[in-house]
């Protein structure tokens, strides 16, 4: 695989995975034995989410070097963040990636916010779990046996959301995944993620 190419992966929503316990954590609840009314609503909503989801991802390898203790330089530009520097310590390269669960979940959320607030909450949590599980799968695919750092996303550790624009452009993610940015640099579809995965030199 060439280091400079943009790699792409997708699957159907039915093939995607939702972690029920994780979804319940997103709702601030504890998953039980399946006998509660919330559990029945969750099963229904997970089916709706999987039916509408269209998971896709792109990633690209970038060189990494550091300016002092708080600035990381990638092929697309510089990011000032001491926490990101610490995360990428010992790395000379990193994979930049973007993933989305697709616009169908956004449509579900709009629909159920007007119809059923509880189902809207559960759909939101199940959609978040689906995209996180999809990112975990892509993370494993990217690592491919290499030693890597935990993925690190804009919005955390002092990495400003404005860097989403550089990432989206670097990955051509608007064209390849349909990810766009609001004026505040939030992503649409809402169940989308960008991140860095450092490759540890051994």
Image (cartoon, rainbow, N blue to C red):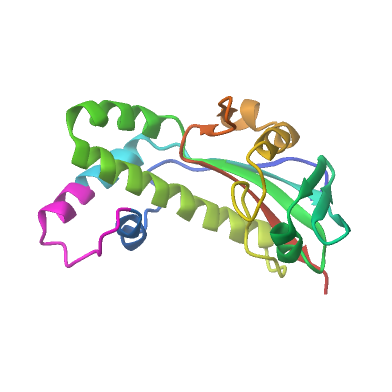
In the image, taking residue 173 as reference, residue 43 lies left or right, namely left
140 or 117, which lies in front?
Answer: 117
Q: Position of residue 34 (x, y in %)?
A: 16, 62
Question: Residue reaching furthest bottom?
Answer: 202
Spot occupied by residue 15 in the image (x, y as percentages of width and height): 41, 48
Report if residue 192 lies within the magenta region.
no
Determine the image quadrant of residue 67. bottom right
Q: Is residue 151 left or right of residue 30?
A: right
Residue displayed at 81% across by 49% down = 62
The picture quadrant where one finds residue 181 is: top right
Q: Quadrant of residue 10?
A: top right
Q: Give the residues drawn in magenta, as a range.
A: 27-43
Image coordinates for residue 70, horizontal then vertical, percent: 79, 57
- Front-lying residue, 101 or 5: 101
For residue 47, say whether it is visible. no
Q: Is 194 placed above or below 71 here?
A: above
Instruction: Identify the residue at horizontal 64%, vertical 49% (top origin).
Output: 195
Residue at 77% x, 47% y: name it: 79
Quarter occupied by the C terminus: bottom right
Please tell me whether residue 202 is drawn above or below residue 105 in the rendered image.
below
Q: Is residue 68 in view from this perspective?
A: yes
Residue in view at x 82 percent, y 39 percent = 76
Query: Relative to residue 25, is residue 78 depicted above or below?
Result: above
């Amino acid at each position: 695989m060439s280091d400079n190419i943009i790699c792409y992966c997708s699957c159907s929503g039915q093939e995607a995975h939702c972690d029920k316990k994780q979804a319940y954590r997103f709702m601030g609840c504890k998953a039980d034995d399946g006998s509660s009314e919330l559990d029945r609503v969750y099963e229904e909503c997970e089916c709706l989410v999987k039916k509408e989801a269209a998971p896709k991802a792109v990633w690209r390898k970038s060189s990494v070097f550091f300016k002092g203790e708080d600035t990381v330089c990638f092929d697309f530009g510089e990011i000032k963040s001491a926490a990101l520097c610490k995360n990428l310590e010992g790395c000379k390269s990193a994979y930049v990636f973007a993933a989305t669960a697709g616009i169908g979940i956004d449509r579900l959320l709009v629909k159920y916010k007007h119809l059923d607030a509880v189902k809207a909450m559960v759909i939101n949590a199940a959609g978040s779990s689906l995209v996180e599980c999809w990112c975990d799968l892509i993370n494993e695919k990217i690592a491919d046996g290499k030693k890597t750092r935990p993925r690190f996303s804009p919005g955390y550790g002092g990495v400003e959301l404005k860097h989403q624009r550089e990432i989206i452009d670097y990955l051509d993610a608007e064209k390849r995944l349909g990810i766009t940015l609001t004026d505040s640099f939030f992503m649409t579809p809402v169940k989308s993620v960008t991140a860095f995965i450092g490759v540890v030199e051994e």
